[in-house]
Amino acid sequence: MDKLTYTALSAMQSQSIARAAITNELANVSTVGFKKSFQIASAAVKIDGPGHESRFQPGLQITDLINLTPGTPISTGRPLDISMNDHTVLGVQTDTGEIAFTRRGDLKVSSTGVLENAAGELIMGEGGPISVPAGNLLTVSPDGTVFAQLPTEPEAAAVAVGQLMLRDASTTQLVRRADGLFEPRAAALKGLDFTSGPQPVSVMPGMLEGSNVNPVGTMIKMLDFSRQFEMQLKLVKETQSIDEAGSTMMRLP
Protein backbone atom coordinates (compact mmCIF):
# COMPACT_ATOMS: atom_id res chain seq x y z
CA MET A 1 0.00 0.00 0.00
CA ASP A 2 2.88 2.34 0.75
CA LYS A 3 4.20 1.90 -2.80
CA LEU A 4 0.79 2.69 -4.30
CA THR A 5 0.37 5.80 -2.14
CA TYR A 6 3.88 7.00 -2.94
CA THR A 7 3.30 6.56 -6.67
CA ALA A 8 -0.01 8.47 -6.52
CA LEU A 9 1.51 11.33 -4.52
CA SER A 10 4.45 11.56 -6.96
CA ALA A 11 2.02 11.80 -9.86
CA MET A 12 0.09 14.58 -8.07
CA GLN A 13 3.31 16.52 -7.52
CA SER A 14 4.31 16.17 -11.18
CA GLN A 15 0.87 17.26 -12.38
CA SER A 16 1.06 20.39 -10.23
CA ILE A 17 4.01 21.59 -12.35
CA ALA A 18 2.05 21.02 -15.54
CA ARG A 19 -0.96 22.85 -14.11
CA ALA A 20 1.28 25.81 -13.23
CA ALA A 21 2.46 26.01 -16.86
CA ILE A 22 -1.14 25.92 -18.12
CA THR A 23 -2.15 28.61 -15.61
CA ASN A 24 0.70 30.79 -16.85
CA GLU A 25 -0.61 30.46 -20.41
CA LEU A 26 -4.12 31.45 -19.34
CA ALA A 27 -2.77 34.47 -17.48
CA ASN A 28 -0.99 35.68 -20.64
CA VAL A 29 -3.81 35.25 -23.16
CA SER A 30 -3.92 39.02 -23.70
CA THR A 31 -0.15 39.69 -23.40
CA VAL A 32 1.39 41.16 -26.56
CA GLY A 33 3.80 38.75 -28.24
CA PHE A 34 3.38 35.98 -25.65
CA LYS A 35 4.31 32.51 -26.92
CA LYS A 36 3.15 29.26 -25.41
CA SER A 37 5.55 26.36 -24.93
CA PHE A 38 5.51 22.79 -26.10
CA GLN A 39 3.86 20.42 -23.66
CA ILE A 40 5.65 19.11 -20.59
CA ALA A 41 6.06 15.34 -21.03
CA SER A 42 5.54 12.77 -18.28
CA ALA A 43 7.96 9.88 -18.01
CA ALA A 44 9.09 7.16 -15.59
CA VAL A 45 12.20 8.22 -13.68
CA LYS A 46 14.52 5.77 -11.93
CA ILE A 47 15.14 6.39 -8.23
CA ASP A 48 18.77 6.07 -7.13
CA GLY A 49 19.72 4.87 -3.69
CA PRO A 50 19.58 1.73 -1.56
CA GLY A 51 16.95 -0.80 -2.55
CA HIS A 52 15.89 -2.71 -5.63
CA GLU A 53 17.09 -1.63 -9.07
CA SER A 54 13.52 -1.76 -10.41
CA ARG A 55 12.25 1.29 -8.52
CA PHE A 56 10.70 3.88 -10.82
CA GLN A 57 8.25 6.73 -10.24
CA PRO A 58 6.34 9.17 -12.47
CA GLY A 59 8.32 12.30 -13.25
CA LEU A 60 8.37 15.24 -15.64
CA GLN A 61 10.70 15.85 -18.52
CA ILE A 62 10.42 19.66 -18.59
CA THR A 63 11.09 20.89 -22.12
CA ASP A 64 10.00 24.51 -22.21
CA LEU A 65 10.57 24.96 -25.94
CA ILE A 66 9.00 28.12 -27.34
CA ASN A 67 6.24 27.60 -29.89
CA LEU A 68 6.67 30.40 -32.44
CA THR A 69 3.32 29.86 -34.13
CA PRO A 70 2.06 33.38 -35.07
CA GLY A 71 -0.55 34.95 -32.82
CA THR A 72 -3.52 37.09 -33.77
CA PRO A 73 -2.43 40.28 -35.63
CA ILE A 74 -3.59 43.57 -34.11
CA SER A 75 -3.63 46.69 -36.26
CA THR A 76 -2.65 49.83 -34.30
CA GLY A 77 -1.39 52.26 -36.96
CA ARG A 78 1.33 53.39 -34.53
CA PRO A 79 4.68 53.79 -36.35
CA LEU A 80 6.73 52.16 -33.57
CA ASP A 81 4.50 49.11 -33.22
CA ILE A 82 5.94 46.12 -35.09
CA SER A 83 4.81 42.54 -35.57
CA MET A 84 7.51 39.99 -36.39
CA ASN A 85 6.89 37.64 -39.32
CA ASP A 86 7.45 33.87 -39.47
CA HIS A 87 10.14 32.82 -36.92
CA THR A 88 11.68 36.27 -36.51
CA VAL A 89 12.62 37.27 -32.96
CA LEU A 90 13.88 40.61 -31.61
CA GLY A 91 16.99 40.97 -29.48
CA VAL A 92 16.81 42.82 -26.14
CA GLN A 93 19.21 43.46 -23.29
CA THR A 94 18.35 42.04 -19.87
CA ASP A 95 18.91 43.69 -16.50
CA THR A 96 22.12 41.67 -16.12
CA GLY A 97 23.48 42.82 -19.49
CA GLU A 98 22.82 39.54 -21.30
CA ILE A 99 21.16 39.23 -24.69
CA ALA A 100 17.71 37.64 -24.84
CA PHE A 101 14.93 37.60 -27.40
CA THR A 102 11.24 38.43 -27.55
CA ARG A 103 8.30 38.75 -29.91
CA ARG A 104 6.99 41.84 -28.13
CA GLY A 105 7.02 44.77 -30.55
CA ASP A 106 5.39 47.70 -28.73
CA LEU A 107 8.43 49.96 -29.00
CA LYS A 108 8.87 53.41 -27.47
CA VAL A 109 11.60 55.90 -26.62
CA SER A 110 12.72 55.89 -22.99
CA SER A 111 13.40 58.96 -20.87
CA THR A 112 17.13 58.44 -21.52
CA GLY A 113 16.69 58.55 -25.32
CA VAL A 114 17.06 54.85 -26.13
CA LEU A 115 14.61 52.46 -27.73
CA GLU A 116 12.76 50.03 -25.44
CA ASN A 117 9.47 48.14 -25.39
CA ALA A 118 6.46 48.68 -23.14
CA ALA A 119 7.88 46.19 -20.62
CA GLY A 120 10.98 48.39 -20.18
CA GLU A 121 13.32 45.96 -21.96
CA LEU A 122 16.16 47.67 -23.84
CA ILE A 123 15.95 47.04 -27.59
CA MET A 124 19.20 45.88 -29.16
CA GLY A 125 20.51 47.01 -32.53
CA GLU A 126 23.24 45.39 -34.57
CA GLY A 127 25.77 47.67 -32.87
CA GLY A 128 24.22 47.79 -29.40
CA PRO A 129 21.31 49.75 -27.90
CA ILE A 130 19.68 52.18 -30.33
CA SER A 131 19.94 55.84 -29.30
CA VAL A 132 17.35 58.19 -30.76
CA PRO A 133 17.82 61.95 -31.39
CA ALA A 134 15.52 64.03 -29.23
CA GLY A 135 12.39 65.43 -30.87
CA ASN A 136 12.49 63.18 -33.92
CA LEU A 137 9.64 61.15 -35.38
CA LEU A 138 10.56 57.48 -35.70
CA THR A 139 9.49 54.88 -38.21
CA VAL A 140 10.54 51.25 -38.73
CA SER A 141 10.94 49.70 -42.18
CA PRO A 142 10.02 46.06 -42.90
CA ASP A 143 13.69 45.02 -42.74
CA GLY A 144 14.04 46.46 -39.22
CA THR A 145 15.80 49.74 -40.02
CA VAL A 146 14.84 52.56 -37.65
CA PHE A 147 14.51 55.99 -39.32
CA ALA A 148 14.34 59.40 -37.63
CA GLN A 149 12.96 62.63 -39.07
CA LEU A 150 12.46 66.10 -37.59
CA PRO A 151 8.79 67.11 -37.62
CA THR A 152 9.83 70.66 -38.52
CA GLU A 153 11.50 69.44 -41.73
CA PRO A 154 8.92 67.17 -43.45
CA GLU A 155 10.61 67.57 -46.80
CA ALA A 156 13.97 66.31 -45.55
CA ALA A 157 14.86 62.65 -46.04
CA ALA A 158 14.59 60.38 -43.00
CA VAL A 159 17.91 59.32 -41.50
CA ALA A 160 18.65 55.74 -40.41
CA VAL A 161 19.63 55.69 -36.73
CA GLY A 162 19.85 51.95 -36.17
CA GLN A 163 19.10 48.41 -37.31
CA LEU A 164 17.03 46.18 -35.05
CA MET A 165 18.68 42.92 -33.96
CA LEU A 166 16.35 40.53 -35.79
CA ARG A 167 17.13 36.82 -35.96
CA ASP A 168 15.45 33.90 -37.69
CA ALA A 169 14.86 31.13 -35.12
CA SER A 170 13.52 28.54 -37.57
CA THR A 171 16.61 26.34 -37.02
CA THR A 172 17.36 27.33 -33.40
CA GLN A 173 15.43 25.94 -30.44
CA LEU A 174 14.51 28.68 -27.97
CA VAL A 175 13.58 28.16 -24.33
CA ARG A 176 11.92 30.48 -21.83
CA ARG A 177 14.04 32.25 -19.25
CA ALA A 178 12.92 32.97 -15.70
CA ASP A 179 12.10 36.56 -16.74
CA GLY A 180 9.85 35.36 -19.59
CA LEU A 181 12.27 36.22 -22.41
CA PHE A 182 13.68 33.68 -24.87
CA GLU A 183 17.22 32.33 -25.21
CA PRO A 184 18.84 29.52 -27.24
CA ARG A 185 18.53 26.05 -25.73
CA ALA A 186 22.23 25.28 -26.29
CA ALA A 187 24.17 25.84 -23.07
CA ALA A 188 27.02 27.55 -24.94
CA LEU A 189 24.63 30.28 -26.20
CA LYS A 190 22.89 31.13 -22.93
CA GLY A 191 22.67 34.93 -22.67
CA LEU A 192 24.31 35.37 -26.09
CA ASP A 193 23.35 36.07 -29.68
CA PHE A 194 22.87 33.22 -32.15
CA THR A 195 23.32 32.82 -35.89
CA SER A 196 20.21 33.71 -37.84
CA GLY A 197 18.53 30.90 -39.80
CA PRO A 198 18.00 30.62 -43.56
CA GLN A 199 14.64 32.39 -43.68
CA PRO A 200 14.63 36.18 -44.20
CA VAL A 201 13.76 38.29 -41.16
CA SER A 202 11.11 40.98 -41.45
CA VAL A 203 8.54 42.95 -39.47
CA MET A 204 5.18 44.58 -40.17
CA PRO A 205 5.06 48.22 -38.95
CA GLY A 206 1.85 49.52 -37.44
CA MET A 207 0.89 46.05 -36.19
CA LEU A 208 1.21 44.08 -32.96
CA GLU A 209 1.10 40.34 -32.47
CA GLY A 210 -1.27 38.95 -29.89
CA SER A 211 -0.71 35.83 -27.82
CA ASN A 212 -0.79 32.48 -29.64
CA VAL A 213 -2.54 30.79 -26.70
CA ASN A 214 -5.90 29.21 -27.53
CA PRO A 215 -8.08 30.05 -24.49
CA VAL A 216 -10.66 27.32 -25.14
CA GLY A 217 -8.08 24.59 -25.72
CA THR A 218 -6.07 25.67 -22.68
CA MET A 219 -9.16 25.65 -20.47
CA ILE A 220 -9.96 22.11 -21.63
CA LYS A 221 -6.44 21.02 -20.70
CA MET A 222 -6.85 22.66 -17.29
CA LEU A 223 -10.10 20.75 -16.68
CA ASP A 224 -8.45 17.52 -17.78
CA PHE A 225 -5.57 18.00 -15.33
CA SER A 226 -8.04 18.86 -12.55
CA ARG A 227 -9.87 15.58 -13.14
CA GLN A 228 -6.58 13.67 -13.06
CA PHE A 229 -5.67 15.37 -9.77
CA GLU A 230 -9.02 14.40 -8.25
CA MET A 231 -8.54 10.81 -9.44
CA GLN A 232 -5.09 10.60 -7.83
CA LEU A 233 -6.43 12.08 -4.59
CA LYS A 234 -9.29 9.57 -4.57
CA LEU A 235 -6.75 6.77 -5.07
CA VAL A 236 -4.81 7.94 -2.00
CA LYS A 237 -7.98 7.99 0.09
CA GLU A 238 -9.03 4.53 -1.11
CA THR A 239 -5.57 3.21 -0.27
CA GLN A 240 -5.90 4.61 3.24
CA SER A 241 -9.29 2.91 3.66
CA ILE A 242 -7.94 -0.44 2.44
CA ASP A 243 -4.94 -0.13 4.75
CA GLU A 244 -7.16 0.62 7.76
CA ALA A 245 -9.43 -2.34 6.90
CA GLY A 246 -6.43 -4.64 6.64
CA SER A 247 -5.09 -3.47 10.00
CA THR A 248 -8.49 -4.15 11.64
CA MET A 249 -8.55 -7.73 10.31
CA MET A 250 -5.06 -8.42 11.68
CA ARG A 251 -5.91 -7.41 15.24
CA LEU A 252 -6.15 -10.24 17.77
CA PRO A 253 -9.54 -10.64 19.51
Image (cartoon, rainbow, N blue to C red):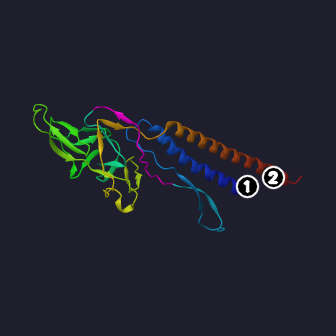
Q: Residue at x 58, y 57 (%)?
A: 43
Q: Residue at x 61, y 49 (%)?
A: 12
Secondary structure of the residue carrying tag 1 is loop
The earlier-in-sequence mark between 1 and 2 is 1
Which label number is shown at residue 41? none
Which label number is shown at residue 1? 1
* Residue 215 screen position, x and y as percent: 50, 37
Which residue is nearer to you in this view: 94 or 51? 94
* Residue 192 screen position, x and y as percent: 31, 57
Q: Which region is colored magenta?
A: 62-77
* Image: 77 above or below 123: above
Side of 170 where 234 appears, left or right? right
Task: Check whether the beta carbons of the residues at disc 1 and disc 2 lie within 8 A of each other.
Answer: yes
Magenta stretch contains residue 18: no
Circle 1 residues within 10 Å: few <14, some 14–19, many ≥20? few
| Cα distance in 3D space between marks 1 and 2 | 10 Å
Q: Residue furthest front?
A: 199
Which label number is shown at residue 246? 2
Magenta region, main secondary structure: loop
Q: Which amino acid is tagged 1? A: Met
Which residue is nearer to you in this view: 47 or 154? 154
Residue 231 falls in which quadrant of the image?
top right
* Residue 68 screen position, x and y as percent: 41, 47
Circle 2 residues within 10 Å: few <14, some 14–19, many ≥20? few
